[in-house]
Image (cartoon, grey):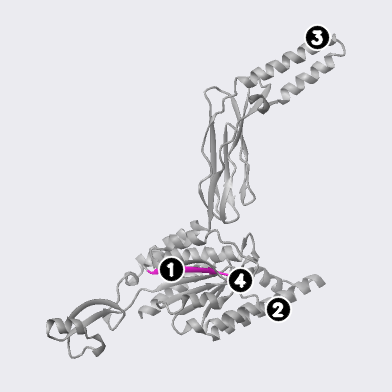
């Protein structure tokens, strides 16, 4: 019943308190009658605004982690009532303003990736006399998806486009390779004395009665395979994000860049088992992002060998492994697994460095606690350096960069590997 959603306002409470005081000097029956009349007027006041207003606007269905998005909700009613609006919020989102009268204007900042259901905007109408407020039923929750930092990723791709457009010969990154003894079949032509015997097309030769040769084109495009560690090490916090958040930001840039340059992109997310896998294909950057954006780290050690076995003897690729090098045992497991891929693929290990560790080492230690903190930070940095050196000896390139710089560093490594393949 609508009466259950009616509540008196501060004005009604004040008038009722005045009637109670007046009962000390006027007949009680007169004060009681005044109170009944007040409550009746409050109910009638709520009755006039019992129909809910129309609410226009809601949270955007797709958000980028860490990037503010506008929230603008407006209440539309046939009368001139005052409508109170409130946006209930969940822990994964921050809203700078959650209430308003007639309209609600604020900015929402997502702090965690994933899929969420945000409660609908709550509304309540004030009667024209200001004696009662009636709460209206809320609508269904709004489903939203919080992705990695797509805004910065698209900005990186726009810079890449401008760089390639302005670089002399930059179009060669998109061109097909020259003719030669490659792996991409081009055509069948007459055999010449300079052709390699392996190019002979025996079926065409038998059919036409003269030697025919296969013409191949050197392979220029390459696969980009991102291996994302989703084990316990990737849950470590880095400022307002985690290691996994920072790695997914960099992976997003690589996936979109592969689309931009015409390469095939795939991804494997793993801990002890393979959790998500996207096979390399053209224009698959968005598919890779969709498959991984809501991934969360698990409190288990990761099996690098299982992930590397999944890549196996596939087409030659740039394999980018996103992990953390802080744990010596995990780094040893990774270094032992690298040679199984390094013979065929180009391996890059990308890890987020924590600037807090360097600050702890460089800052002057004025107390015993600060000195102990500096020693611990120094040990961690030494362990990371030793792990990186071991990986390089195993045949992998290593990228260590702060979270904000990691996407650009990984993009540069990708472009350099692509340039070397075309040399």
Task: State the CA–CA distance, disc 1 to disc 4.
Answer: 29 Å
What residue is disc 3 on?
A: 30
Q: Can the viewer see residue 98 in this picture?
A: yes
In the drawing, what numbered circle is on residue 379? 2
- Residue 331: quadrant of the picture: bottom right
Disc 1 or 4, which lies upstream in sequence? 1
- Give residue 268's position: percent from left, percent from top: 50, 69
Q: Are marks 2 and 4 in contact (CB under 8 Å)?
A: no
Task: State the CA–CA distance, disc 3 to disc 4.
Answer: 77 Å
Task: State the CA–CA distance, disc 3 to disc 2.
Answer: 83 Å
Q: Nearer the viewer, residue 141 or 1?
A: 1
Disc 2 or 1, which lies upstream in sequence? 1
Disc 2 or 4, which lies upstream in sequence? 4
- Give residue 101's position: percent from left, percent from top: 60, 32
In the drawing, what numbered circle is on residue 279? 1
Task: State the CA–CA distance, disc 2 to disc 1.
Answer: 39 Å
Q: Mark 3, residues whose alpha carbon is within 10 Å: few (<14), some, or many (≥20)?
A: few
Q: Mark 4, residues whose alpha carbon is within 10 Å: few (<14), some, or many (≥20)?
A: many
Magenta residue span:
263-272
Q: Is residue 237 above or below residue 41?
A: below
Q: Is residue 132 above or below residue 248?
A: above
What residue is disc 4 on?
A: 353
- Is residue 313 found inside the magenta-colored segment of the image? no
Task: State the CA–CA distance, disc 3 to disc 1.
Answer: 83 Å
Quarter of the picture containing the N terminus is: top right
């Amino acid at each position: 019943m609508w009466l259950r959603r009616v509540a008196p306002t501060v004005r009604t409470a004040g008038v009722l308190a005045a009637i109670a005081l007046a009962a000390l000097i006027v007949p009680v029956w007169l004060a009681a009658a005044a109170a009944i009349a007040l409550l009746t007027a409050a109910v009638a006041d709520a009755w006039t605004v019992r129909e809910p207003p129309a609410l226009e606007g809601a949270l955007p269905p797709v958000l980028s982690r860490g990037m503010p998005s506008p929230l603008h909700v407006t209440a539309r009613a046939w009368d001139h009532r005052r409508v109170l609006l409130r946006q209930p919020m969940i822990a994964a989102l921050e809203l700078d303003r959650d209430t308003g009268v007639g309209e609600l204007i604020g900015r929402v900042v997502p702090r965690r990736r994933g899929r969420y259901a945000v409660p609908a905007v709550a509304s309540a109408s004030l009667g024209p006399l200001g004696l009662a407020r009636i709460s209206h039923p809320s609508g269904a929750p709004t489903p939203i998806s919080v992705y990695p930092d797509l805004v910065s990723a698209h900005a990186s791709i726009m810079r890449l486009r401008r760089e390639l457009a302005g670089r002399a010969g930059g179009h060669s990154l998109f061109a097909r390779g020259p003719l030669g003894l490659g792996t991409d079949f081009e055509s069948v032509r007459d055999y010449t004395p300079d052709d390699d015997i392996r190019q002979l097309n025996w079926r065409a030769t038998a059919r036409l009665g003269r030697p025919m040769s296969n013409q191949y084109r050197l392979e220029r495009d390459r696969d980009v395979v991102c291996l994302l560690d989703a084990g316990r090490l990737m849950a470590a916090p880095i400022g307002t994000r985690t290691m996994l958040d920072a790695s997914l930001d960099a992976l997003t840039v690589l996936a979109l860049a592969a689309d931009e340059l015409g390469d095939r992109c795939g991804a494997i997310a793993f801990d002890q088992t393979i959790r998500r896998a996207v096979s390399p294909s053209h224009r698959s950057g968005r598919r890779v992002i969709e498959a991984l954006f809501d991934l969360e780290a698990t409190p288990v050690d990761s099996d690098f060998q299982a992930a590397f076995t999944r890549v196996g003897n596939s087409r030659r690729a740039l394999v980018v492994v996103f992990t953390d090098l802080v744990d010596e045992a995990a780094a040893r497991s990774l270094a032992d697994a690298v040679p199984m891929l390094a013979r065929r693929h180009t391996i890059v290990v990308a890890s987020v460095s924590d600037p807090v560790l360097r600050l702890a080492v460089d800052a002057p230690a004025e107390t015993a606690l600060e000195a102990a903190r500096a020693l611990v930070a120094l040990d961690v940095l030494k362990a990371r350096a030793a792990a990186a050196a071991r990986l390089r000896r195993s045949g992998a390139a290593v990228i260590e960069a702060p979270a904000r710089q990691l996407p650009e560093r990984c993009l540069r490594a990708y472009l350099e590997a692509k340039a070397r393949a075309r040399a």
